[in-house]
Amino acid sequence: MNKKFSIASMIALCGACISFYIGAGFATMQEVVQYEASYGSLFPVVILVAAIIYVYTNISFATNGNRLNLQRGGDIYETYCGVFGKKFGKIASVFFDYFSAFFCYMSFVVMCGGASSTVAQQWGLPNGVGAVVLAILVIETTIFGLDGILKSLSKIGPVIILMILIVSIITAISGAPDLSSNIAAVDSGTYSDVMKQVGRGNPFASGASYGGFVILWFAAFLAEIGAKNKLSEVNSGMGLSTLFIFGAAGICCMALIGHIDVTAAADIPALVLAAQISPILAQVFAIVICAGIYTSAVPLLWTGVRKVADEGTRKYKYVTIVGGILGCVIACFVPYKGLINVLYGLNGYLGFILVFFMIIYDVKTRMSKKK
């Protein structure tokens, strides 16, 4: 732990955070539509709220995971919930631990649904083909455990965010002449019948939900990474990822609203934007979306499996295989847009409750240190 700060390690950890965050919802821009672009002129409020939550919670996860040297990331819930006493803390921590593992697994199902929709929309392949291919790749990667996952994600994340930025910047520029009028149309509710919205018209609630659902994605993942790596590198990498993720989200919103007439009702708005530039780019971007889905699906499945099995064991391999296959089957029969809206929204609000526990714990810890 006393080794010198490594810029290469920081960049790798930044790439891993980006890869984890940019899954099916972000890469397809469907979650950007529902959480942010649907708020028109108020989308910056949603982004700001979500970014603040992302930074605070992830620093807290990594810092406490490192300080307590946690052996399993999911143990972080007992740490936070214990501020209200051992009995309540135990009950609450068990709930969050199991619910977050279940939610991460169901989010893996969402990733399978995103892959299925992307492949069907772009290449006209039968429903389920994308889900099957994704499930096979994710199962193979997850079996290698956390170290193997980090190596895979750290290289793919920067490439994905770069491609998203290229498409978003170009289409934001081409849609700039219509941006003001389209923002007014979104604000007036013109597209409310085809554009799902999280938060029911409250941008703060949407931002809290958006930041909240990521909390339970990152909690066990970053707590364990924080325990196994140099803390300054983890926090610096996570901070750098914030600039890329939420900067890209802002540009995506402008691009989506600039072309709102064709993106509002689309299952995969990102492909619609890419097609505005070039049909060939749309083909390339479909592959990028699939890569983004893969990079989130791997740690999500890992988090769910890790709750019930230790890495390296025969049980871990069996649960990974069975869980991957089951998630693929579910994704083939449940609508993708409905999965995102209901699952992410519910989890976001529960995740925000955890923030309350976290703040109290971190304040108490800091005060005791000063004493």
Image (cartoon, rainbow, N blue to C red):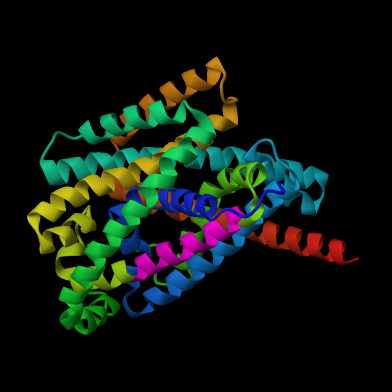
Residue nearest the viewer, comparing 346 with 1: 1
Residue nearest the viewer, comparing 290 with 48: 290
Residue lying farthest to the left in this orientation:
279
Work out whether 240 lies above or below 297: below
Lateral position of residue 108 relative to residue 234, left or right: left
Residue 60: image location, x then y, percent = 65, 57
Residue 105 showing in the rendered view:
no
Residue lying farthest to the top in this orientation:
314
Res 260 quadrant in image? bottom left
Residue nearest the viewer, comparing 362 with 283: 283
* Rendered-image quadrant of the C terminus: bottom right
Work out whether 183 lies above or below 353: below
Residue 37 showing in the rendered view:
yes
Work out whether 140 lies above or below 338: above
**Region rendered in magenta:** 233-250
Residue 81: image location, x then y, percent = 72, 50
